[in-house]
Image (cartoon, rainbow, N blue to C red):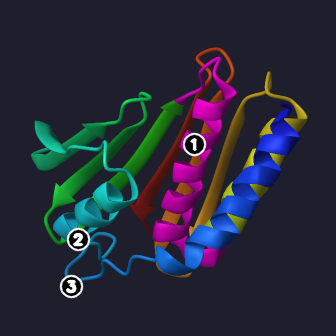
Amino acid sequence: MSLSVIVRNIFLASVLLIPCLPANAQSGGAGMHLNRDVLIKKLTEADKGLVFKQDTDISLLPNFVAVDANGSQAQLIGKPDELVIVKWTYVFKADEKVNLIELQKLAWFANTLGDQEGLDWFFTQLAELGKDYRKSISEIKMFDSKRKGEISYSPKEKTLTMTFTPW
């Protein structure tokens, strides 16, 4: 199955799933106005295999990490109501069905943190990746929600990362 077929399948699946998945995990405070517990709940509802555990603090901020059965990693850094980094990392596998499932999760993640604008941005970057998967990608986008998103792809490690921070 070609990458363009995978992209099309992700788009179709996302169009069907997006209306029932939005997460307005907003709360007060600085950071991205995301409540960690609410976001963890939304992420684990979307992927039952994610189990978040507190990891070593980063810059004196709580760090919660979850890894699913396919190796995707979600990371939430910041105080409960003041997340400063929300990150999803996936390493492509040889199994195209696994890749499709994980790319659907990334589409959901982009929609959850960037709304429709985030989803459109994700698909644009995925289309670029589909043109040449041997080329690195690093794209930054500022969202109306006062969040900055970054998508990066490393062909050497076959790693796709999506990170959201406040701006």
Horizontal and vertical percent position of residue 115: 55, 76
Q: Is residue 54 left or right of residue 152?
A: left
Of helix, strand and loop, which one carries label 1?
A: helix
Residue receiving disc 3: 28
- Answer left or right for 139 relative to 133: left
Specify whether residue 92 is painted magenta: yes
Q: Which residue position is annotated with label 2? A: 38
Quadrant hosting residue 92? top right
Q: Amino acid at mark 2?
A: Val
The residue that disc 1 covers is 101
Q: Is residue 143 shown to the viewer in this render?
A: no
Q: In this orientation, which residue lies closer to the viewer: 164 or 38?
A: 38
Q: Residues within 10 Å of mark 2 (few under 14, many from 20)?
A: some
Q: Position of residue 12 (x, y in %)?
A: 74, 62
Judged by its main secondary structure, the magenta piece is: helix
At 83% from the left and 30% from the top, the residue drawn is 1
The span from disc 3 to disc 2 (Cα, nearest Å) is: 13 Å
Of callouts 3 and 2, which one flags the residue occurring earlier in the amino acid sequence? 3
Say which of 167 and 83 sits in front.
83
The residues colored magenta run 91-117
Kind of residue at badge 1: Ile
Mark 3 vs mark 1: in front: 1
Report the front residue among 1 and 92.
1
Secondary structure beneath label 2:
helix
